[in-house]
Image: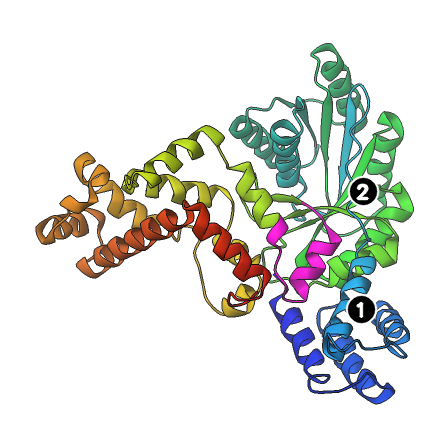
């Protein structure tokens, strides 16, 4: 996510490395690189110019404290302005009402239908709501079928009527159905087009006028860059939407849409899609995104994802096993599966400060753990619970059964033993206190 933009910002700040103070000359040189980085990311020229002008105004005349360098001060100012550029604070979705009604809008191929499913999943599992999905695309039967498939996967009801060709009537009937069946949120997926046209705009405007949604979202493919911003402007002029959803942010996105859209249409980005899975949806936090763009990672989001998968009772059992030195391959496999639930592995690595740069160019597949899982599943129940039983002959059998080789089995054994040692060390309060002292004193690498 935004790897190229991060690299270019880093190169821009290198101009100030070794400088004793901020001056007109070195700021101008740095901001020239920053502006170029923004333009390369498909940010509009007007937005890029305003951004660098604001940063320059704030930077010139700043007293550089002896404890920080001019480069660090410039990063701080750029961070603040990136946060402002992307909206300042996160903005929640409005689902108040009986029921709350969310209307989707956007071009065909932007990911509206998939996002509708993701939003239903988010509201059901994280907000405790009972959502109803509504198929209002009267032109593409495949879109209706897709929504039914998503609903089945999520355990969420889908309302559709393939015989009815009036989207306004379908939406109204769906809301009446929701009220009679005690659904407290209605998510309406509408038709898209390959380009903005009058028929499309009139139709979505008619639907909005008839149902008066509590929230209207504009869904846009973040990989379309500045085109996404222009499309958002056209939609906002007609339907006055409440917020933006950026999909496919895990792809080869340059970042222009995320950085420009708030300043152009003055509407907040509310959600971002970060993968194909139905739980790959994040609330948009401008400060966290600015951290990632500037190569500082996003530890808060990483911790939140971990907490979502955290089972307190299981953690207590695991802690007891670790203290008794009974951590085994069943536990190891369980931990791997929890990490998998947290999302795309490369995306998770990018949330760790410094790791995004280290992982540049490294391809990590979504099923990166499949070989490890195959090896563990090729073990007998006795071998999983007592890893010390695994000798040379057993390793050969495990390798053959998992389609791997002896070297990979040996590597797994080493990873398991290293993990076991680390967990044993971390279960000791004294060791944890020492580690925390080191972190506070900057004694650990990268801290």
Whether label 1 touches label 2, CB < 8 Å: no
Give the residues drawn in magenta, as a range: 283-300
Q: Position of residue 199 (x, y in %)?
A: 83, 42
Q: Residue at x 78, y 27 (%)?
A: 101
Q: Position of residue 58 (x, y in %)?
A: 88, 72
Q: Is residue 65 left or right of residue 138?
A: right
Mark 1, other Cα within 10 Å: few <14 / some 14–19 / many ≥20: some
The circle on residue 200 is 2
Would you say residue 292 sits in the magenta stretch?
yes
- Residue lying at the far left of the rendered structure: 393
Q: Nearer the viewer, residue 37 or 217?
A: 37
Of badges 1 and 2, the one in the foreground is 1
Mark 2, other Cα within 10 Å: few <14 / some 14–19 / many ≥20: some
Spatial CA distance of label 1 from label 2 is 42 Å
| Image height of 382 relative to 210, above or below | below
- Residue lying at the far top of the rendered structure: 180
Q: Residue at x 59, y 36 (%)?
A: 142
In terms of image quadrants, where is residue 45? bottom right
Q: Residue at x 44, y 41 (%)?
A: 338
């Amino acid at each position: 996510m935004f790897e190229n933009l991060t690299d270019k910002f880093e190169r821009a700040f290198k101009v100030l490395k070794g400088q004793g103070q901020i001056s007109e000359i070195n700021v101008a040189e740095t901001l020239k690189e920053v502006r170029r980085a923004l333009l390369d990311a498909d940010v509009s020229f007007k937005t890029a110019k305003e951004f660098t002008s604001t940063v320059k105004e704030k930077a010139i005349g700043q007293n550089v404290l002896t404890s920080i360098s001019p480069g660090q001060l410039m990063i701080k100012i750029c961070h603040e302005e990136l946060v402002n550029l992307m909206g300042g604070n996160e903005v929640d979705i409005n689902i108040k009402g009986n029921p709350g009604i969310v209307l989707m809008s956007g071009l065909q191929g932007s990911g509206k239908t998939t996002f509708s499913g993701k939003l239903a999943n988010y509201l059901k599992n994280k907000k405790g709501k009972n959502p109803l999905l509504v198929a209002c695309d009267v032109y593409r039967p495949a879109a209706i079928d897709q929504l039914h498939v998503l609903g089945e996967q999520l355990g969420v009801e889908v309302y559709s009527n393939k015989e009815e060709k009036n989207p306004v009537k379908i939406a109204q009937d769906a809301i009446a159905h929701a009220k009679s069946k005690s659904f407290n949120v209605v998510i309406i997926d509408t038709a898209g087009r390959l380009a903005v046209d009058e028929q499309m705009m009139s139709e979505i405007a008619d639907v909005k006028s008839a149902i008066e949604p509590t929230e209207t979202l504009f869904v846009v493919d973040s990989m379309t860059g500045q085109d996404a911003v222009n499309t958002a402007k056209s939609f906002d002029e007609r339907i006055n939407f409440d917020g933006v959803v950026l999909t496919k942010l895990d792809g080869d996105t340059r970042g222009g849409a995320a950085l420009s859209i708030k300043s152009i249409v003055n509407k907040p980005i509310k959600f971002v899609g970060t993968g194909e899975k139905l739980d790959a949806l994040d609330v948009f936090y401008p400060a966290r995104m600015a951290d990632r763009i500037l190569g500082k990672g996003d530890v808060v989001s990483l911790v939140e994802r971990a907490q979502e998968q955290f089972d307190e009772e299981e953690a207590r059992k695991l802690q007891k096993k670790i203290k008794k030195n009974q951590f085994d391959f069943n536990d190891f496999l369980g931990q791997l599966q929890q990490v998998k639930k947290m999302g795309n592995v490369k995306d998770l690595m990018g949330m760790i400060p410094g790791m995004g740069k280290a992982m540049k160019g490294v391809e990590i597949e979504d099923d990166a753990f499949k070989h490890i899982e195959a090896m563990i599943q090729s073990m007998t129940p006795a071998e999983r619970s007592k890893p010390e039983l695994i000798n040379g002959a057993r390793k050969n059998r495990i390798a053959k059964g998992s389609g791997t080789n002896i070297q990979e089995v040996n590597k797994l054994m080493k990873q398991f033993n290293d993990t076991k040692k680390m967990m044993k060390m971390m279960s000791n309060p004294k060791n944890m206190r020492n580690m925390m002292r080191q972190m506070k004193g900057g004694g650990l690498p990268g801290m």
